[in-house]
Image (spheres, rainbow, N blue to C red):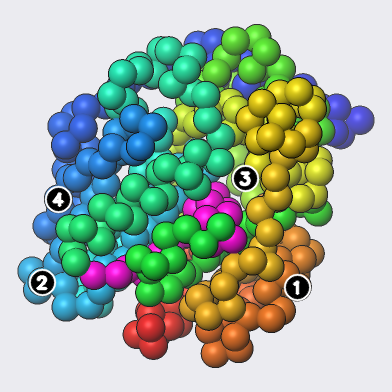
Amino acid sequence: MANSKISLVLVVILWVSAGEARRKVYKINGQDGGICKSMVVTQGYVCEEHTVTTDDGYILSLQRIPASRSGKKSDKPPVLLQHGLLMDGATWVLNSPDESLGFILADNGFDVWLANTRGTNYSRGHTSLSPSDPAYWDWSWDELVAYDLPATVKHVLDKTGQNLHYVGHSLGTLIAFAAFSQHKVMEMLRSAALLSPIAYLGQMPSPLGRAGADSFLAEDLYWLGLYEFAPRGAAVEKLLADICKKPNNNCSDLMTSFTGKNCCVNSSQTDNFLAHEPQSTATKNMIHIAQMVRGGSIEKFDYGNAEENNNHYGQPNPPTYNMSSIPDNLPLYLSYGGADLLSDVKDVKTLLNSLKGHDSDKLVVQFREDYAHADFVFGVNAKQVVYNPLMSFFKLH
């Protein structure tokens, strides 16, 4: 009964969202309140807006913070920060400067770059397509692995002349694991720090996440012709506000049921968060993630039948991303939490089992019993418990 109620709420939210979301297509290069102008410069930091075009035509924005708040130019290697699902690069600068990883890295001498995947507010450009075209949304995280990640990493390398460190959260870890398993981009990296690491989702206990996957909600939206998964809009905001007012449904409980009980998120930042997130992704991307939840494996997008898979892959089943193929000498820092309902402890252990042959001096694993999914990017104590050890790891590589 509980799952049925959750599924009903999700159906209503997704339907209203997709049907009535009012999108503002933001201009690139910092106009109309870009991340640099609205989030970074306001905190006293120098910020540069960059764009890069992927091989399949998507125009992505990146932001660079090349100096500390005091104005001291970076004297350490570049770091590329890759956000999670339904987020963008603002993830890393939403909290105060002494709590946000983007600012903390800049103040510690690193050359900081914020990535923004296709479809998010400042990465909605394309060489020939518009976000109103269904073809614009014909992608899943496979394309982030094949196009977005290599393009952004190469851009940072080209602009700085240095190999870089990579930090991913949630979906940002998934695309990294998949790329590493295919030996992509590693020649341009010094190391990778992966927070709330996701490679497997088969044991994910999140009630909302699993209900959405098991109910094939994203598939239903796709076949209804709703190719953009747009989780914003006035109607949705009103619906969620009404849900939050009910006696047993407050916003913190809804977040907990989806991500886990976050111990350390600054609740005073809620309005700031909602002003920027969540953001659009492709419905096809949500389908791909749901396939991972239902199937328990990490594979390319399943087109649903042997003929279509053969057309795309030359085989009846989607190819697997083999985690044991990740080179043993790639420096990795993995940090996961005991309260995380998306990057579940059991799924992380499945991942770690795939990495059991990794060079011991190249793999650091940190476990925080009290941390859930959002704590790793919004926790008020994340600097002390996660970011300081992360920077120490970077200094070794």
Residue at image coords 42%, 42%: 147
Q: Inspect the magenta stretch and tell me whether residue 168 lies in it.
A: yes
Can you tell which of label 3 and label 1 is closer to the viewer?
1
Question: In the image, which residues are magenta?
Answer: 162-181
Q: Which residue is mark 4?
A: 48
Q: Percent x, y for residue 70? A: 10, 71
Residue that appears at 32% across and 68% down: 164
Upstream in the sequence, badge 2 or badge 4? 4
Q: Earlier in the sequence, mark 3 or mark 1?
A: 3
Tell me: residue 64, above or below residue 300: below
Q: CA distance from mark 2 to mark 4?
A: 13 Å
Residue displayed at 39% across by 88% down: 396
Observer-nearest of 12 and 191: 191
Circle 3 sits on which residue?
Answer: 255
Whether label 3 touches label 2, CB < 8 Å? no
Foreground of the two, 89 or 377: 89
